[in-house]
Image (spheres, rainbow, N blue to C red):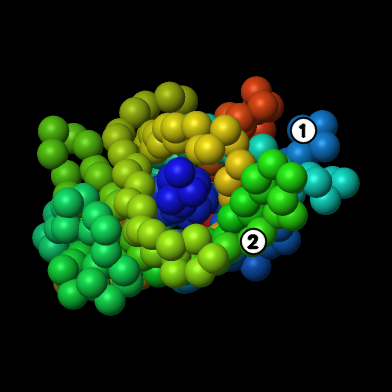
């Protein structure tokens, strides 16, 4: 039962691993915090280079981080669904990057996962969750996050986030995120992840950090152009208790060429 808590942990990183993460983590700017009632969700990070072509896609390295907490420091509710729309001027590229399947990552620790799929790694980081079972003091658990390319088929890109925990919760979990192109005004990319109920909501993301590589096997996983001096992202997170945290974040970029 406790093993399923880990699903939430891997999803924490997914906020940052879609193309929309480019805007959420614009370089050199202060963290952005969204408050809904007692709940506070914060995003931060950066990308390089920050000066982008006005007309052509520029490869970037993305660093992103996030935190979820209650203002009164109580145990936060678990995330159930993430829906992220990314700026139409950002793109995700996976053609030519080696692929990995969910089956190759199931029931593996970090060493075994890398042995099976190291060429498909496009990002690395860590994720932490707080687990609060009835009548027990909440426990924070941290794991390494490995992000693997699952490939593209029928216009849908699949990525897998792998997290393995050895103490105090033992087990591995593989979480899937799907990325598709979808035009909606300013936005052009849609990433969606649905999370099943985790031990009645006992496990909740509290923080994550992730870096997506600029070059994998000669391919640039994420690129962007600065057409009008800004990048925008729309994020919606639905929590176990029915709370919705939703916002649009605008970041400045520098156009060149």
31 and 228: which is toward the camera: 31
Number of numbered discs visible in the structure rendering? 2
Identify residue for label 1.
Answer: 36
Q: Nearer the viewer, residue 243 or 218?
A: 243
Q: Picture coordinates of residue 122 (x, y %)?
A: 30, 65
Expressed as whole percent of the image width and height from the top left, the position of residue 49 reads: 46, 70
In this rendering, the answer to whether 256 lies above or below 110 is above
Q: What residue is disc 2 on? A: 140
> Residue at coordinates 72% horizontally, 61% vertically from top-left?
30
Is 147 on the left-hand or right-hand side of 150? right
User: Is any part of residue 65 visible from this angle?
Assistant: no
Q: Residue at x 45, y 35 (%)?
A: 195
Label 2 vs label 1, nearer the camera: 2
**Percent of width and height locating residue 71:** 84, 46
Of callouts 2 and 1, which one flags the residue occurring earlier in the amino acid sequence? 1
Q: Residues within 10 Å of mark 1 (few under 14, many from 20)?
A: few
Quadrant location of the N terminus in the rendered image: top left
Viewed as shown, does residue 174 lie left or right of 228? left
Q: Nearer the viewer, residue 219 or 67?
A: 67
Query: In whole angstroms, how far apart are the C-alphas of marks 2 and 1?
Result: 23 Å
| Res. 84 mark | none
Q: Residue at x 37, y 27 (%)?
A: 183
Dividing the picture into quarters, in which one does residue 144 lie? bottom left
Taking 207 as reference, is 93 left or right? left
Task: Provide residue 88's location: percent of width, then percent of height.
Answer: 40, 39
The quadrant of the image that shows the C terminus is bottom left
């Amino acid at each position: 039962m406790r093993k399923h808590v880990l699903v939430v942990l891997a999803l924490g990183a997914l906020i940052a691993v879609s193309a929309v993460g480019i805007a959420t983590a614009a370089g050199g700017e202060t963290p952005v915090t969204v408050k809904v009632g007692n709940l506070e969700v914060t995003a931060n990070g950066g990308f390089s280079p920050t000066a982008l072509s006005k007309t052509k896609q520029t490869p970037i390295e993305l660093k992103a981080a996030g935190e979820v907490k209650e203002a009164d420091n109580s145990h936060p509710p678990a995330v159930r669904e993430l829906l992220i729309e990314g700026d139409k001027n950002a793109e995700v590229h996976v053609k030519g990057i080696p692929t990995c399947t969910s089956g190759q990552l199931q029931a593996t620790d970090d060493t075994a996962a890398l042995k099976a799929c190291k060429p498909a790694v496009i990002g690395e980081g860590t994720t932490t969750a707080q687990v609060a079972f009835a009548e027990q003091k909440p426990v924070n658990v941290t794991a390494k996050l490995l992000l693997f390319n699952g490939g593209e088929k029928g216009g849908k890109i699949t990525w897998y986030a792998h997290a393995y925990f050895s103490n105090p919760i033992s087990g591995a979990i593989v979480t899937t995120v799907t990325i598709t192109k979808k035009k909606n005004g300013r936005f052009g990319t849609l990433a969606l992840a649905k999370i099943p109920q985790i031990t009645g909501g006992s496990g909740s993301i509290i923080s994550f950090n992730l870096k997506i590589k600029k070059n994998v096997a000669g391919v640039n996983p994420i690129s962007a152009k600065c057409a009008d001096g800004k990048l925008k992202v729309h994020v919606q997170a639905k929590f176990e208790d029915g709370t919705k945290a939703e916002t649009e974040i605008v970041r400045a970029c520098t156009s060149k060429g």
